[in-house]
Amino acid sequence: MLIGILLAVVAGFVVTQAAMFATTMYLHRGITHRALVAHPVLAFACRFGLWITTGMRPREWAAVHRRHHAATDTPEDPHSPVQSGFWRVQLLNAVMYRRVARDGVTVERYARDLPPDRFDRLLFDHAWLGLGLGVTVLCALFGWVFGPWGILLGFLAAAVHAVGYLGLSGAVNAVGHTFGRRPNPNSATNGWLLALLTWGEGLHNNHHDRPTAARFSRRWFQIDHAWWGIRMLTWLRLVRLRRMRVNG
């Protein structure tokens, strides 16, 4: 039983990290800032993976994030710890995101270039369907390995993932605008531990300095392993870089 619990925790962590990579590579550096273009097959895989692990609509994520850059740490920022407080952003980041994404204004203003397509209408706009499918897959896999009680392990893995992804996403906005170093003249911060856990997203000060750069790291010791993955995907011809403003 202990082995099953440990495997469920590990599985939840792995799912979180896969979702974080898709978030930073596809949602953030790709469709939001146009720093790279993913091959249609990879783009669909990311959309599907994010659908069953987060339920997010890519155009809404992009719109909210673009608004964040347009109004960083001002009253118009959707999730600023300066305006709303550290713990509110850390714990309620997803609620704040959803409220702004569904306000009827933000998506129309900031994501006109990302109209819904047939896959959105058929699948990806139905968040609970995607999340339900993701949980079902985990329960089926653990049930197949461990029998009936493995279904509970599937729910445990899903819970670990939910806490991990929501916690790390909140930390990028809360910690990433409160604690850490500011080598560039903006209100975001760099933090090595957050960068390690979020595929480079913790290099938030660097990102705000040059939002359209596909690479967040500037120094050899800064951790941006999503960039290493992007370079590999470029070599495999699954990603094409559009802009590269940081040398190396």
Image: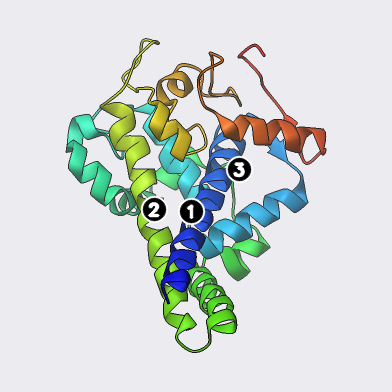
Q: Nearer the viewer, mark 3 or mark 1?
A: 1
Classify 143 as above or below 27: below
Q: Secondary structure at mark 1?
A: helix
The answer to which of 206 and 80 lies nearer the viewer is: 206
Whichever of callouts 2 and 3 sits on the residue coming sooner in the sequence is 3
Residue 212, numbered circle: none
- Mark 2 or mark 3, whichever is nearer to me: 2
Q: Which residue is mark 1?
A: 16
Under circle 2, the secondary element is helix
Task: Specify few, some or many for label 2: CA neighbours under 10 Å numbering under 14, 14-19, or 20 or more.
Answer: many
Would you identify the image quadrant in which residue 112 lies?
top right
67 over 55 or under it: above or below:
above
Q: Is residue 56 above or below residue 247?
A: below
Q: How many marks?
A: 3
Look at the image and tell me in which quarter the N terminus lies.
Answer: bottom left
- The answer to whether residue 54 of the structure is visible from this angle is no
Identify the residue position indicated by label 3 in the image. 26
**Relative vertical location of residue 232 with respect to residue 214 in this rendering, above or below:** below
Q: Give the side of residue 82 with respect to residue 234, left or right.
A: left
Q: Position of residue 214 (x, y in %)?
A: 61, 26
Residue 62 visible in rendering: yes
Could you tell me residue 239's position as x and y percent?
74, 37
Say which residue appears at 53% left-offset and 24% top-offset. Answer: 216
Residue type at numbered disc 2: Gly
Residue 70 percent location from the top left of the image: 39, 27
